[in-house]
Image (cartoon, rainbow, N blue to C red):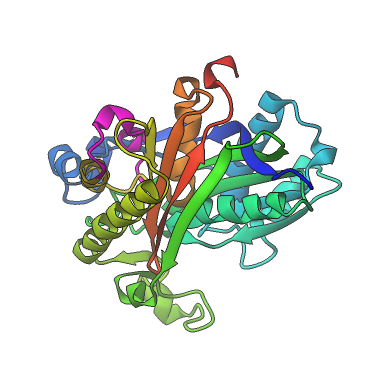
Amino acid sequence: MSNKISAVITGVGGYVPDYILTNEELSRMVDTNDEWIMTRVGIKERRILTEEGLGTSYMARKAAKQLIQKTGVDPDTIDVLMVATSTADYKFPSTASIVLGKLGLKNAFAFDFWGACCGFLYSLDVAASMIQCGRYKKIIIIGADKMSSVTDYKDRQTCPLFGDGAAAVLLEASEEENIGVMDSYFRADGKGLPFLHLKAGGSVCPPSHFTVDHRLHYLYQEGRTVFRYAVTNMSDDCALIAERNGLNKDNIQWIVPHQANMRIIEAVAKRLEVSMDQVIVNIEHYGNTSAATIPLALWDNESRLRKGDNMIFTAFGAGFVHGASYYKWAYDGSEK
Protein backbone atom coordinates (compact mmCIF):
# COMPACT_ATOMS: atom_id res chain seq x y z
CA MET A 1 0.00 0.00 0.00
CA SER A 2 1.63 3.22 -1.11
CA ASN A 3 1.35 6.32 1.03
CA LYS A 4 -0.66 9.24 -0.24
CA ILE A 5 1.61 11.81 -1.90
CA SER A 6 1.25 15.43 -0.82
CA ALA A 7 2.01 18.37 -3.13
CA VAL A 8 3.73 21.15 -1.19
CA ILE A 9 5.15 24.57 -1.99
CA THR A 10 8.77 24.55 -0.84
CA GLY A 11 9.74 28.08 -1.86
CA VAL A 12 8.62 31.32 -3.48
CA GLY A 13 10.45 33.74 -5.78
CA GLY A 14 9.22 37.04 -7.17
CA TYR A 15 10.02 39.97 -9.40
CA VAL A 16 8.46 43.38 -9.94
CA PRO A 17 9.86 45.99 -12.34
CA ASP A 18 11.67 49.03 -10.92
CA TYR A 19 9.46 51.69 -12.50
CA ILE A 20 6.68 52.88 -10.17
CA LEU A 21 3.64 54.50 -11.78
CA THR A 22 1.90 56.56 -9.08
CA ASN A 23 -1.67 57.84 -8.97
CA GLU A 24 -0.27 61.35 -9.16
CA GLU A 25 1.45 60.56 -12.45
CA LEU A 26 -1.69 58.83 -13.78
CA SER A 27 -3.74 61.92 -12.98
CA ARG A 28 -1.57 63.82 -15.46
CA MET A 29 -2.35 61.22 -18.18
CA VAL A 30 -6.12 60.80 -17.71
CA ASP A 31 -8.90 62.54 -15.80
CA THR A 32 -8.51 60.85 -12.43
CA ASN A 33 -7.03 61.51 -8.99
CA ASP A 34 -5.51 59.73 -6.02
CA GLU A 35 -8.61 60.03 -3.84
CA TRP A 36 -10.89 58.54 -6.50
CA ILE A 37 -8.57 55.57 -7.14
CA MET A 38 -7.92 54.90 -3.43
CA THR A 39 -11.62 54.96 -2.44
CA ARG A 40 -12.78 52.93 -5.45
CA VAL A 41 -10.04 50.30 -5.64
CA GLY A 42 -7.35 50.94 -3.02
CA ILE A 43 -4.34 51.21 -5.32
CA LYS A 44 -1.60 53.79 -4.66
CA GLU A 45 0.96 52.68 -7.24
CA ARG A 46 1.78 49.94 -9.68
CA ARG A 47 4.99 48.61 -11.26
CA ILE A 48 5.49 48.90 -15.02
CA LEU A 49 8.00 47.05 -17.20
CA THR A 50 9.06 49.97 -19.39
CA GLU A 51 12.16 48.57 -21.11
CA GLU A 52 11.79 48.18 -24.85
CA GLY A 53 11.67 44.58 -26.07
CA LEU A 54 11.05 42.94 -22.69
CA GLY A 55 7.89 40.92 -22.13
CA THR A 56 6.28 38.60 -19.63
CA SER A 57 9.01 35.94 -20.03
CA TYR A 58 11.61 38.38 -18.67
CA MET A 59 9.74 38.84 -15.39
CA ALA A 60 8.84 35.14 -15.19
CA ARG A 61 12.49 34.20 -15.64
CA LYS A 62 13.62 36.65 -12.95
CA ALA A 63 11.10 35.20 -10.48
CA ALA A 64 12.05 31.60 -11.31
CA LYS A 65 15.76 32.39 -11.06
CA GLN A 66 15.29 33.81 -7.58
CA LEU A 67 13.18 30.76 -6.65
CA ILE A 68 15.91 28.35 -7.80
CA GLN A 69 18.58 30.30 -5.88
CA LYS A 70 16.48 30.48 -2.69
CA THR A 71 15.49 26.81 -2.65
CA GLY A 72 18.82 25.50 -3.90
CA VAL A 73 16.94 23.03 -6.11
CA ASP A 74 19.00 21.37 -8.86
CA PRO A 75 17.56 22.74 -12.16
CA ASP A 76 18.11 19.32 -13.78
CA THR A 77 15.60 17.77 -11.37
CA ILE A 78 12.71 20.03 -12.45
CA ASP A 79 10.09 17.97 -14.34
CA VAL A 80 7.69 20.67 -15.52
CA LEU A 81 7.62 24.44 -15.88
CA MET A 82 4.21 26.13 -16.10
CA VAL A 83 3.58 29.79 -16.78
CA ALA A 84 0.12 31.14 -15.97
CA THR A 85 -0.38 34.29 -18.05
CA SER A 86 -2.80 36.21 -20.25
CA THR A 87 -0.04 38.37 -21.74
CA ALA A 88 2.24 35.84 -23.40
CA ASP A 89 5.33 37.12 -25.23
CA TYR A 90 4.02 35.72 -28.52
CA LYS A 91 1.04 33.83 -29.91
CA PHE A 92 3.55 30.99 -30.08
CA PRO A 93 5.91 29.61 -28.91
CA SER A 94 4.74 29.49 -25.30
CA THR A 95 6.21 31.90 -22.78
CA ALA A 96 7.05 28.87 -20.63
CA SER A 97 9.28 27.40 -23.34
CA ILE A 98 11.18 30.71 -23.56
CA VAL A 99 11.65 30.78 -19.77
CA LEU A 100 12.72 27.12 -19.73
CA GLY A 101 15.31 27.82 -22.44
CA LYS A 102 16.74 30.84 -20.62
CA LEU A 103 16.92 28.92 -17.32
CA GLY A 104 18.61 25.98 -19.06
CA LEU A 105 16.28 23.29 -17.70
CA LYS A 106 17.38 20.07 -19.40
CA ASN A 107 14.86 17.51 -18.16
CA ALA A 108 11.60 19.42 -18.14
CA PHE A 109 8.75 20.24 -20.47
CA ALA A 110 6.93 23.56 -20.46
CA PHE A 111 3.55 25.01 -21.28
CA ASP A 112 1.48 28.14 -20.73
CA PHE A 113 -1.69 28.07 -18.70
CA TRP A 114 -4.39 30.50 -19.73
CA GLY A 115 -6.72 30.99 -16.77
CA ALA A 116 -6.84 34.81 -16.66
CA CYS A 117 -6.74 36.04 -13.05
CA CYS A 118 -7.36 32.47 -11.82
CA GLY A 119 -4.30 31.23 -13.74
CA PHE A 120 -2.10 30.62 -10.71
CA LEU A 121 -4.92 29.12 -8.64
CA TYR A 122 -5.89 26.69 -11.42
CA SER A 123 -2.36 25.73 -12.40
CA LEU A 124 -1.44 25.04 -8.77
CA ASP A 125 -4.26 22.49 -8.70
CA VAL A 126 -3.27 20.93 -12.02
CA ALA A 127 0.37 20.69 -10.90
CA ALA A 128 -0.72 19.17 -7.57
CA SER A 129 -2.68 16.49 -9.45
CA MET A 130 0.39 15.74 -11.59
CA ILE A 131 2.45 15.30 -8.42
CA GLN A 132 -0.17 13.33 -6.48
CA CYS A 133 -0.49 10.77 -9.28
CA GLY A 134 3.17 9.96 -8.70
CA ARG A 135 4.54 10.70 -12.18
CA TYR A 136 6.16 14.06 -11.42
CA LYS A 137 8.25 15.19 -8.45
CA LYS A 138 9.12 18.86 -8.96
CA ILE A 139 7.14 21.50 -10.80
CA ILE A 140 7.79 25.23 -11.10
CA ILE A 141 4.61 27.30 -11.42
CA ILE A 142 4.95 30.95 -12.40
CA GLY A 143 2.17 33.52 -12.41
CA ALA A 144 3.31 36.40 -14.63
CA ASP A 145 1.59 39.21 -16.48
CA LYS A 146 2.66 42.39 -18.25
CA MET A 147 -0.77 44.00 -17.97
CA SER A 148 0.63 47.35 -19.13
CA SER A 149 0.91 45.79 -22.61
CA VAL A 150 -2.89 45.47 -22.85
CA THR A 151 -3.91 48.52 -20.81
CA ASP A 152 -5.38 51.56 -22.57
CA TYR A 153 -3.80 54.60 -20.91
CA LYS A 154 -6.55 56.77 -22.38
CA ASP A 155 -9.28 54.82 -20.54
CA ARG A 156 -9.63 56.32 -17.07
CA GLN A 157 -11.89 53.48 -15.89
CA THR A 158 -9.31 50.70 -16.36
CA CYS A 159 -5.81 52.19 -16.57
CA PRO A 160 -5.41 52.76 -12.80
CA LEU A 161 -6.18 49.11 -12.03
CA PHE A 162 -3.34 47.14 -13.59
CA GLY A 163 0.36 46.56 -13.06
CA ASP A 164 3.18 44.21 -14.11
CA GLY A 165 4.86 41.48 -12.09
CA ALA A 166 5.72 37.81 -11.69
CA ALA A 167 6.12 35.27 -8.91
CA ALA A 168 7.05 31.60 -8.90
CA VAL A 169 6.61 28.66 -6.55
CA LEU A 170 8.30 25.28 -6.43
CA LEU A 171 5.79 22.50 -5.91
CA GLU A 172 7.28 19.22 -4.70
CA ALA A 173 6.14 15.73 -3.79
CA SER A 174 6.17 14.97 -0.07
CA GLU A 175 5.33 11.91 2.00
CA GLU A 176 4.23 14.07 4.90
CA GLU A 177 0.49 13.85 5.33
CA ASN A 178 -2.13 16.56 5.81
CA ILE A 179 -0.03 19.31 4.24
CA GLY A 180 0.12 21.31 1.00
CA VAL A 181 -2.71 21.41 -1.53
CA MET A 182 -5.75 20.10 0.36
CA ASP A 183 -8.93 20.93 -1.55
CA SER A 184 -10.31 23.15 -4.27
CA TYR A 185 -13.58 24.35 -5.74
CA PHE A 186 -13.31 25.89 -9.22
CA ARG A 187 -15.94 26.96 -11.70
CA ALA A 188 -16.17 28.76 -15.03
CA ASP A 189 -19.10 30.58 -16.57
CA GLY A 190 -19.05 31.56 -20.24
CA LYS A 191 -21.47 34.42 -19.82
CA GLY A 192 -18.66 36.70 -18.69
CA LEU A 193 -17.34 37.26 -22.23
CA PRO A 194 -19.09 40.59 -22.99
CA PHE A 195 -18.02 42.13 -19.68
CA LEU A 196 -14.28 41.43 -19.63
CA HIS A 197 -12.26 40.70 -22.74
CA LEU A 198 -9.58 41.76 -25.19
CA LYS A 199 -11.38 41.88 -28.51
CA ALA A 200 -8.71 41.83 -31.21
CA GLY A 201 -5.62 39.77 -32.00
CA GLY A 202 -7.20 36.32 -31.73
CA SER A 203 -8.66 34.10 -34.44
CA VAL A 204 -12.12 35.74 -34.32
CA CYS A 205 -10.84 39.25 -34.90
CA PRO A 206 -7.26 39.16 -36.29
CA PRO A 207 -5.15 42.33 -36.24
CA SER A 208 -5.97 44.91 -38.92
CA HIS A 209 -5.74 48.66 -39.36
CA PHE A 210 -9.34 48.81 -38.17
CA THR A 211 -8.65 46.95 -34.90
CA VAL A 212 -5.64 49.14 -34.15
CA ASP A 213 -7.44 52.40 -35.01
CA HIS A 214 -10.38 51.44 -32.81
CA ARG A 215 -8.17 50.50 -29.84
CA LEU A 216 -9.43 46.90 -29.82
CA HIS A 217 -6.06 45.49 -28.69
CA TYR A 218 -6.64 46.75 -25.17
CA LEU A 219 -8.50 45.19 -22.29
CA TYR A 220 -12.19 46.08 -22.08
CA GLN A 221 -14.03 45.81 -18.79
CA GLU A 222 -17.52 46.67 -17.64
CA GLY A 223 -16.43 47.36 -14.11
CA ARG A 224 -19.74 47.32 -12.23
CA THR A 225 -20.83 43.94 -13.55
CA VAL A 226 -17.42 42.36 -12.98
CA PHE A 227 -17.30 43.77 -9.45
CA ARG A 228 -20.72 42.32 -8.58
CA TYR A 229 -19.88 38.85 -9.91
CA ALA A 230 -16.46 38.86 -8.24
CA VAL A 231 -17.83 39.68 -4.79
CA THR A 232 -20.57 37.04 -5.02
CA ASN A 233 -18.45 34.25 -6.47
CA MET A 234 -15.27 34.70 -4.42
CA SER A 235 -17.32 34.96 -1.20
CA ASP A 236 -19.46 31.91 -2.04
CA ASP A 237 -16.44 29.85 -3.12
CA CYS A 238 -14.50 30.65 0.07
CA ALA A 239 -17.52 29.87 2.24
CA LEU A 240 -17.98 26.52 0.49
CA ILE A 241 -14.30 25.54 0.85
CA ALA A 242 -14.30 26.61 4.50
CA GLU A 243 -17.44 24.65 5.34
CA ARG A 244 -16.29 21.55 3.46
CA ASN A 245 -13.02 21.46 5.41
CA GLY A 246 -14.19 22.53 8.86
CA LEU A 247 -12.50 25.90 8.57
CA ASN A 248 -13.72 29.04 10.34
CA LYS A 249 -12.45 32.41 11.56
CA ASP A 250 -10.70 30.71 14.51
CA ASN A 251 -8.63 28.18 12.56
CA ILE A 252 -8.01 30.02 9.28
CA GLN A 253 -4.65 31.77 9.56
CA TRP A 254 -4.65 33.50 6.16
CA ILE A 255 -6.92 34.40 3.28
CA VAL A 256 -4.89 35.13 0.14
CA PRO A 257 -7.26 36.74 -2.36
CA HIS A 258 -6.65 37.86 -5.92
CA GLN A 259 -5.71 41.54 -5.69
CA ALA A 260 -8.18 43.30 -7.99
CA ASN A 261 -10.06 45.68 -5.73
CA MET A 262 -9.84 46.44 -2.01
CA ARG A 263 -13.64 46.47 -1.69
CA ILE A 264 -13.88 42.94 -3.13
CA ILE A 265 -11.21 41.74 -0.69
CA GLU A 266 -13.04 43.35 2.25
CA ALA A 267 -16.33 41.76 1.17
CA VAL A 268 -14.71 38.28 1.12
CA ALA A 269 -13.23 38.84 4.61
CA LYS A 270 -16.61 39.98 5.92
CA ARG A 271 -18.35 36.89 4.52
CA LEU A 272 -15.86 34.60 6.29
CA GLU A 273 -16.02 36.77 9.42
CA VAL A 274 -12.23 37.06 9.54
CA SER A 275 -10.44 40.25 10.51
CA MET A 276 -8.45 42.09 7.84
CA ASP A 277 -5.32 41.16 9.85
CA GLN A 278 -5.81 37.61 8.56
CA VAL A 279 -6.01 38.75 4.93
CA ILE A 280 -2.85 39.15 2.87
CA VAL A 281 -3.08 42.38 0.89
CA ASN A 282 -0.52 44.15 -1.30
CA ILE A 283 -2.82 45.74 -3.90
CA GLU A 284 -1.81 49.23 -2.76
CA HIS A 285 1.69 48.82 -4.18
CA TYR A 286 1.23 46.54 -7.18
CA GLY A 287 -2.37 46.89 -8.40
CA ASN A 288 -3.88 43.97 -10.30
CA THR A 289 -1.09 41.87 -11.84
CA SER A 290 -3.59 39.20 -12.98
CA ALA A 291 -2.09 35.70 -12.64
CA ALA A 292 0.78 37.07 -10.51
CA THR A 293 -1.30 38.51 -7.64
CA ILE A 294 -1.55 35.46 -5.37
CA PRO A 295 2.06 34.23 -5.71
CA LEU A 296 3.31 37.84 -5.33
CA ALA A 297 1.30 38.12 -2.11
CA LEU A 298 2.93 34.90 -0.86
CA TRP A 299 6.37 36.20 -1.88
CA ASP A 300 5.83 39.54 -0.15
CA ASN A 301 4.61 37.92 3.06
CA GLU A 302 6.62 34.68 3.15
CA SER A 303 8.31 35.58 6.45
CA ARG A 304 4.90 35.74 8.20
CA LEU A 305 3.86 32.23 7.14
CA ARG A 306 4.27 29.33 9.55
CA LYS A 307 4.27 25.60 8.99
CA GLY A 308 0.75 24.24 9.33
CA ASP A 309 -0.99 27.56 8.64
CA ASN A 310 -4.44 27.05 7.12
CA MET A 311 -4.84 29.25 4.06
CA ILE A 312 -7.61 29.92 1.58
CA PHE A 313 -6.64 31.18 -1.88
CA THR A 314 -9.39 32.71 -4.00
CA ALA A 315 -9.65 34.49 -7.36
CA PHE A 316 -11.99 35.70 -10.07
CA GLY A 317 -11.26 36.61 -13.67
CA ALA A 318 -12.24 36.86 -17.32
CA GLY A 319 -14.48 34.06 -18.54
CA PHE A 320 -15.81 34.32 -15.99
CA VAL A 321 -13.53 32.02 -14.05
CA HIS A 322 -13.55 31.78 -10.28
CA GLY A 323 -12.70 29.53 -7.37
CA ALA A 324 -11.10 28.95 -4.01
CA SER A 325 -8.63 26.44 -2.67
CA TYR A 326 -7.56 25.25 0.76
CA TYR A 327 -3.80 25.10 1.23
CA LYS A 328 -1.83 24.11 4.34
CA TRP A 329 1.55 25.88 4.44
CA ALA A 330 4.52 23.53 4.69
CA TYR A 331 7.45 25.49 6.18
CA ASP A 332 8.37 28.42 8.41
CA GLY A 333 8.78 31.31 5.99
CA SER A 334 10.99 33.29 8.37
CA GLU A 335 13.74 30.69 7.92
CA LYS A 336 13.98 31.11 4.13
* Residue placed furthest toward the top: 335
Does the magenta segment cover residue 284? Answer: yes
Answer whether residue 263 is magenta in the image. no
Q: Which residue occupies 76% across, 41% down?
A: 103
In this rendering, position of residue 18 left or right of residue 233: right
Against 299, is 184 above or below? below
| Residue shown at the point (37%, 64%) measured from the top left | 219
Q: Is residue 55 visible?
A: no
Point out the residue furthest to the bottom here.
Answer: 204
Q: Is residue 133 above or below residue 215?
A: above
Q: How many marks?
A: 0
Say left or right for 12 vs 159.
right
Q: In this orientation, does residue 215 appear?
A: yes
For residue 37, above or below residue 207: above
Q: Is residue 10 left or right of residue 19?
A: right
Please provide the residue range marked out in magenta. 272-288
Q: Position of residue 41 (x, y in %)?
A: 22, 45
